[in-house]
Structures are given as C-alpha cells and as structure tokens.
Amino acid sequence: MFDVKAWAVYIVEWAAKDPYGFLTTVILVLTPLFIISAALSWKLAKMIETREREQKKKRKRQENIVKAKRAKKD
C-alpha cells in the first residue's frame, strides 16, 4: 500500500535539497488550477448577475401588472 509518511519525507527532502525546483514545480502545477478557478468564479458571478437581473425584471413586471389591475378597478 502507499506509504504517506515516506512520501511526505521524500517531498520535504526534495524541497530542502532543491527549493527552487520544488517551488517551480509547485507553481507550474497550481497555475492552471488557479486559472480554472478564476474562470469558473467569473462565470458564476455572471450567472448570478444575470439571474438577479431576470428576477428584478419579473418583480417589476408583476408590480406593473398589479398597478394595471388596480387602475382598471378604479
């Protein structure tokens, strides 16, 4: 089975022996993940804004319908 402790020791030794190589590798691995995260966050923000705009339009439409019905009753 996979020994986590031995793997962690290997990573720590690698980071101690070659810190620049270790950091470069970590940055290269994490950069695409950060880019994906940023893109998905932006997309989610746009979806939320769109939904809020639609809800605002629906609310305003409903208010106008109620006003029109009240005006007809008078």
Image (tube, helix red, strand yellow):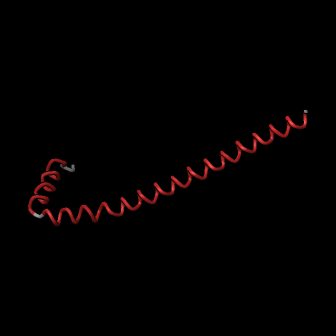
Q: Answer above or below: position of 70 versus 9.
A: above
Q: Which residue is pictured at 12% across the width and 64% down the height?
A: 18
Q: Residue at x 21, y 50 (%)?
A: 2
Please give the name of the residue rendered at 13% of the width and 56% of the height, measured from the top-left corner. 10
- On the image, the x and y values in percent for residue 39 come to 45, 60
> Furthest residue to the top?
74
x, y percentage for residue 4? 19, 48
Which quarter of the rendered picture does the C terminus lie within? top right
- On the rendered structure, is 67 left or right of 49? right
Q: Residue at x 17, y 53 (%)?
A: 7
Q: Nearer the viewer, residue 8 or 15?
A: 15
Give the side of residue 50 with respect to residue 59, left or right: left
Q: Position of residue 31 (x, y in %)?
A: 32, 63
Residue 33 spot, x, y in % from top left: 36, 59
Front residue of 12/7: it is 12
Instruction: Between residue 71 and residue 61, name the one nearer to us.
Output: 71
Of residues 60 and 58, the one nearer the viewer is 60
User: Does residue 71 sit above or below 12 in this rendering?
Assistant: above
From the viewer's perspective, is 69 left or right of 9?
Answer: right
Q: Residue furthest left?
A: 17
Residue 13, image quadrant? bottom left
For residue 68, above or below residue 2: above
